[in-house]
Amino acid sequence: MKGSLALAGGMAFFLVTGCAVHKDWAATGGSRSDGTVRLSYEVGEFEKPQLSERQAIMLASKRCKAWGYKGAEAFGGVTRQCNQFGGFNGCSNWMVTKEYQCTGTGQRSAQ
């Protein structure tokens, strides 16, 4: 009986606190003419994402530089969209997206 209670308590703790998990940002959209890049990652209901803002800036800057801009900077907050309904909170999987603004003029240099 004690073992069952300990197991149930451990599972309840896991469900409440979640699990830390490393996530990488991925380019999911943007506009060359507007000079914007969208980066996203997916996260499960009980996951606590560990993210690198440095990785995000490097990825957004790489995309912007390919378009002729100098770099990128964060454009605002994040948006969350439910990808899979269910679970305790009504959504078991989220797509989290952040937008970045390209910096510079956006003109390709002559080669």
Image (tube, helix red, strand yellow):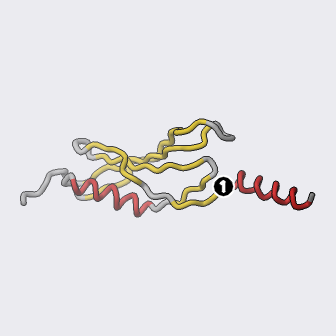
Q: In the image, is residue 110 above or below residue 80?
A: below
Task: Using residue 83 as the reference point, say whether residue 61 is left or right of it.
Answer: left
Which x, y percent locates residue 61? 30, 58
Q: Amino acid at mark 1?
A: Gly
Q: Which residue is mark 1?
A: 18
Which x, y percent locates residue 65? 23, 57
Residue at x-position 49% and y-position 59%: 51
Q: In the image, is residue 4 above or below residue 75?
A: below
- Residue at the outermost right position: 1
Q: Secondary structure at mark 1?
A: loop
**Which quarter shows the N terminus?**
bottom right
- Neighbourhood count class around disc 1 (C-alpha, 10 Å): few under 14, some 14–19, many 20 upward: some
> Which quadrant of the figure has residue 13?
bottom right
Task: Using residue 70 as the reference point, say whether residue 38 is left or right of it.
Answer: right
Which x, y percent locates residue 26? 39, 53
Which x, y percent locates residue 10? 78, 58
Task: Using residue 91 as the reference point, say whether residue 11 is left or right of it.
Answer: right
Residue at x-position 44% and y-position 46%: 97
Number of residue marks: 1
**Which quarter shows the C terminus?**
bottom left
Q: Nearer the viewer, residue 56 or 46?
A: 46
Q: Nearer the viewer, residue 111 or 93?
A: 93
Q: In the image, is residue 29 above or below residue 55?
A: above
Q: Nearer the viewer, residue 34 or 18?
A: 18
